Image: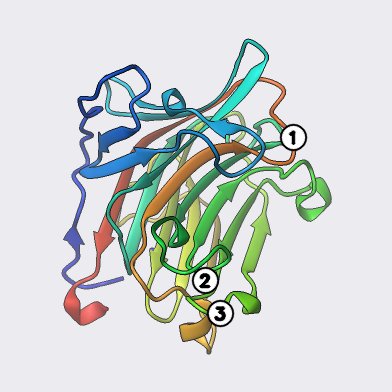
């Protein structure tokens, strides 16, 4: 999230919602991947509703927490394919530095959704949230978290908490580079293309000596969600993911 001869695995243009019956389809085609939208139980205290993850006419993915008739629902989707070592990037539009304190935007490779390890394993997170004002005693609103590989849940996650300030702006780029031995995660203001690192708000590299234990080693699906932590958000929330790109390393760089 550093390789020679990178292979671009995703086109930069989106493909719209796949044909399906009914308004709340659970299948989506976007950024060259097939995605399954959560319908029902998901992370947090609000259930997932398929209409809370949709692609607009610009090819942008909207993730929403929606209040309707006193009911609060959230949005979540996972790629049907698995992705491994390489660079992952999201271009985001929204007030991710100032959402409801109970709202969480998660961007994350996640194995357990596809039976690859169990919860607490094979997960790499970029998350924007105040976590009910508990992160850094209320001073932080984002985190990078890496969970261990299959069979090593007892080791526990490694986390880097920080504050992101967009100064009233709403454009941000989140990137992670995942390799056999290390993970680098970066948040930048503005919409930054792959291969460019500028306007860095925060970056962190995790390179443990016991990397086979502390870094996921298997390809896994990618998840994205906007969900409610401990308490339902007081108002509707929305974040736009303008693009998602995955770049696999060349065989020599793996």
CB atoms of marks 2 and 3 within 8 Å: no
Mark 1 highlights which residue? Answer: 231
Image coords of residue 210 (percent x, y): 53, 88
What whole-number distance in Å separates the C-alpha atoms at marks 3 and 1?
Answer: 30 Å
Determine whether, in the image, residue 115 is placed left or right of residue 81. Answer: right
Determine whether label 3 and label 1 are within 8 Å by CB: no
Residue 205, numbered circle:
2
Query: Can you give x and y, in whole percent of width and height, for residue 212 in the image?
Result: 46, 85
Front label number (2 vs 1): 1
As drawn, the label of residue 152 is: 3
Number of numbered discs on residues:
3
Residue 32 lies left or right of residue 209; in this view the side is left
Whichever of callouts 3 and 1 sits on the residue coming sooner in the sequence is 3
The label number, if any, that marks residue 198 in the structure image: none
207 over 169 or under it: above or below: below
In this image, 114 relative to 202: left or right?
left
């Amino acid at each position: 999230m550093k390789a020679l001869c990178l292979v671009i695995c995703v086109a930069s243009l989106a493909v719209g919602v796949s044909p399906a019956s009914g308004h709340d389809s659970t299948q989506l085609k976007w950024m060259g991947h097939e995605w399954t939208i959560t319908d029902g139980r998901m992370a947090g205290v609000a259930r997932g509703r398929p209409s809370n993850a949709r692609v607009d006419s610009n090819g942008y993915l909207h993730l929403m927490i929606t209040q309707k008739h006193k009911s609060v629902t959230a949005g979540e989707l996972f790629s049907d394919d698995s992705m491994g070592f390489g660079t992952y990037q999201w271009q985001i539009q929204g007030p991710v530095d100032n959402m409801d304190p109970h709202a969480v935007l998660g961007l994350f490779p996640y194995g357990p959704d596809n039976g690859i390890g169990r919860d607490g394993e094979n997960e790499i997170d970029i998350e924007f949230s105040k976590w009910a004002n508990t992160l850094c005693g209320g001073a932080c609103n984002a985190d990078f978290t890496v969970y261990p590989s299959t069979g090593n849940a007892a080791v526990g996650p490694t986390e880097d908490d920080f504050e992101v300030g967009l100064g009233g702006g709403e454009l941000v780029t989140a990137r992670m580079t995942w390799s056999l031995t290390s993970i680098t995660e970066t948040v930048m203001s503005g919409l930054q293309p792959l291969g460019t690192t500028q306007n860095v708000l925060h970056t962190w590299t995790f390179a443990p000596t016991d990397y086979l234990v502390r870094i996921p080693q298997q390809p896994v699906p990618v998840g994205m969600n906007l969900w409610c932590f401990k308490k339902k958000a007081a108002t509707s929330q929305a974040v736009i993911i303008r693009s998602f790109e995955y770049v696999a390393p060349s065989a020599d760089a793996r």
